[in-house]
Each structure stands twice: as C-alpha cells, then as structure tokens.
Image (cartoon, rainbow, N blue to C red):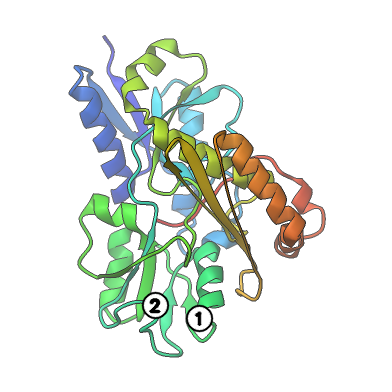
C-alpha cells in the first residue's frame, strides 16, 4: 500500500501537529510521509496578520497540493481553515480538542490585572487586541509575529511586558514556563476552532475517510461546527475581531460570542444554548448582527463587505 502523504506548513507547531497525526496513523499500521508546504501566511511574516487580508492564507497552497495529488491529507489548525471549503474538499476529522483558552505570558507580571498602565503587550490578533483594549484601554498593543519560540524569545529579551498566545500551541510544544494567566473565555473569547486540528481530504475519498474516522471527536466537531457557523454567518475573517467559544454539557451546546471594534471602544456579546450546532451558531450570529455587528463589519471592511458572507475564516495567530 502506498504511504499516506500529509501536507503541512513548516512551522514548529504545524510540524508537531502533522507528526502527531502521523504517529496515530502509524500506530494503526499505515506508512506515512510529511511534505512541508510554504503558504501565503508564512511568506508575509513581517507584517500584522490583519494587513495581509488573504482568505485561506494558511491553507490555500496546501489545498492546491491536495488537489494535485501531491499529498493525500492536510493537517490544519482548525481556526486557520475557511468555514466554507472550496469545492472538491471535505473535513474528514476534527481531533479531540485542547483547551481553547488564550494565555498571557510575562516575565514579571502575574496577569492582565497586574500589568501596569502603559505596559506593552504583544499580539497580532485583532480579536485579542480588541478585547484587551476594552478591558484595559491603558495598555499599549504592539504587533508580534513569528513562531512560538520567536515570540517567547522577544518576551524574554524584554521587548514586551507580556504577550498573548493560544494555550493549545504552548501545551503542544511544552512551553508553559512563562504562562501567568489562563484567560477565561468571558474575558477574551477565543477564535472559532481554537485548540482543535482539522484534517482535510479530497471530497469523496472513501478509503481515506475511513482511515481517518478514528481521529474524529464528536464533541469537538459539534462545538467547532457551532463556532464556525457563527463565524460564517458574520462573514468574519482575519481583519475583524470575532471570538466564538462553544462547549457541550448534558447533550446541549452553549455558545458565547464577541464582535468588537479593533480599538475596543465597542464590544458586542451574545450567549445562547441549543442542541443543533450549525443552527445555534447561525442564531447567535443573527443576534449579533441585530445588535450592530454589521456596523463594525462595515467599519473594518468598508461598505458592502458585511454582505460578503462566504469563505470566512478565523486566521488568528498561534
């Protein structure tokens, strides 16, 4: 049998994720190879994510390799994967989810509340920036790109008083030494799909779908489907601060979501519960639109952009 070829970005975290899936497949007797693919998001590393503005900036080139048959499956951070997959692809599995929270790292300060006025916080995520500025308008937010190690080195060198990253990425790479606060979703709502991996294949590949079925986690798929439906209903991408966090309890999903101006001057929140993931996400999106989310979308994207509700993705930083 031919080896299964995994397409992955070349970052340390992406390769950890690809190797994690490869190990699970090898344990089931499959031969696996990993091909590193450079994406648009990897090329534009010197500018804030919101300045790039490309849909599928971390996935497009990998999907091209998948369509061409160079690879058989792609392992993505689910939050990077557009909510509407291009024709010819399907989401074969959503893995068991790591904690979706963001975390604050600092060499000096115990958490957000402990940061002094004027403290410099590093993040290139408008979602994090907006919610942090709403909470602490006195803080200074400065762009921070690069892989996890690079960001931590910049913090340790004194370039920042604190930085904010996803808990899942730090956990996967074993970098938890400087974590000072696990940030509650009520404080900074995570990106849709944060903490889960999405495995993408060519649509209709029944053999591969069957091979990957054991990796699909029903609870993670339901929660992230709910979050992604919310994101899709708002037409959100990397330039709009949107947070979504769903969790299952007693067979019902609860979803909390946020849409905010980048400067934090206006934050819209909504929370609902339900049993159908996509229906719940769409409902919460509609409620946010009634509250004025369209106004924020127009402000960030320009007039008419709020109606372009296709291909949305979280495209948030690690």
| Depth check, front residue: 9 or 203 | 203
Measuring from the top left, give residue 166's x and y in whole percent: 37, 58
Measuring from the top left, give residue 90's x and y in whole percent: 51, 25
- Judging by the rendered image, the residue that carries numbered circle 1 is 136
Q: Is 81 placed above or below 114 here?
A: above
Report the side of 38 relative to 264 (left or right).
Answer: left
Quadrant containing the N terminus is top left
| Depth check, front residue: 169 or 74 | 169
Dot 1: few (<14), some (14–19), or many (≥20) neighbours within 10 Å?
A: some
Report the side of 241 relative to 186 (left or right).
Answer: right
Badge 2 vs badge 1, beta-carbon distance below 8 Å = yes
Image point 27% across, 79% down: which residue?
Answer: 157
Image point 62% across, 59% down: which residue?
Answer: 240
Q: Is 3 placed above or below 122 here?
A: above
Quadrant containing the C terminus is bottom left
Report the side of 25 relative to 89 (left or right).
Answer: left
Query: Which secondary structure, mark 1?
Result: loop
Mark positioned earlier in the residue sequence (2 or 1): 2
Measuring from the top left, give residue 239's x and y in whole percent: 61, 59
Q: Looking at the rendered structure, which numbered label has been put on residue 112? A: 2
Task: Give the spatial CA distance, label 2 vs label 1.
Answer: 8 Å
Determine which quarter of the picture holds residue 36: top left
Image point 52% across, 19% down: which residue?
Answer: 203
Please say whether residue 143 is visible from this viewpoint: yes
Dot 2: few (<14), some (14–19), or many (≥20) neighbours within 10 Å?
A: many
Please say whether residue 47 is visible from this viewpoint: no
Report the side of 276 relative to 293 (left or right).
Answer: left
């Amino acid at each position: 049998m031919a080896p299964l070829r995994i397409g992955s970005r070349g970052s340390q975290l992406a390769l950890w994720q690809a190797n994690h899936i490869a190990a699970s497949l090898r344990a089931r007797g499959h031969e696996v190879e990993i091909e590193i693919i450079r994406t648009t998001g990897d090329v534009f590393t010197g500018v804030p994510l919101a300045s790039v503005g490309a849909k599928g900036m971390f996935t497009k080139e990998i999907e091209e390799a998948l369509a061409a048959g160079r690879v058989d499956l792609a392992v993505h951070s689910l939050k990077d994967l557009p909510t509407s997959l291009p024709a010819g692809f399907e989401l074969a599995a959503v893995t068991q989810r790591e904690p979706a929270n963001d975390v604050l790292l600092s060499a000096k300060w115990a958490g957000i509340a402990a940061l002094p006025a004027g403290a410099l916080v590093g993040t290139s995520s408008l979602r994090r920036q907006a919610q942090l500025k709403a909470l602490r308008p006195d803080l200074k937010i400065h762009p921070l790109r690069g892989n996890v190690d690079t960001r931590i080195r910049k913090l340790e060198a004194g370039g920042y008083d604190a930085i904010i990253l996803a808990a899942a990425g730090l956990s996967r790479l074993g970098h938890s030494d400087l974590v000072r606060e696990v940030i509650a979703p009520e404080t900074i709502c995570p990106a849709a799909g944060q903490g889960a991996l999405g495995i993408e294949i060519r649509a209709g590949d029944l053999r591969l779908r069957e091979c990957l079925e054991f990796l699909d986690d029903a609870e993670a798929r339901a929660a992230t489907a709910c979050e992604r439906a919310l994101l899709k209903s708002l037409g959100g991408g990397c330039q709009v601060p949107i947070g979504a966090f769903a969790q299952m309890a007693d067979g019902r999903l609860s979803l909390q979501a946020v849409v905010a101006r980048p400067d934090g001057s206006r934050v819209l929140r909504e929370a609902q519960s339900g049993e159908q993931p996509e229906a719940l996400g769409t409902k919460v999106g509609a409620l946010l639109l009634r509250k004025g989310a369209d106004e924020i979308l127009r402000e960030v994207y320009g007039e008419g952009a709020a109606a372009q509700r296709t291909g949305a993705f979280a495209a948030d930083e690690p």
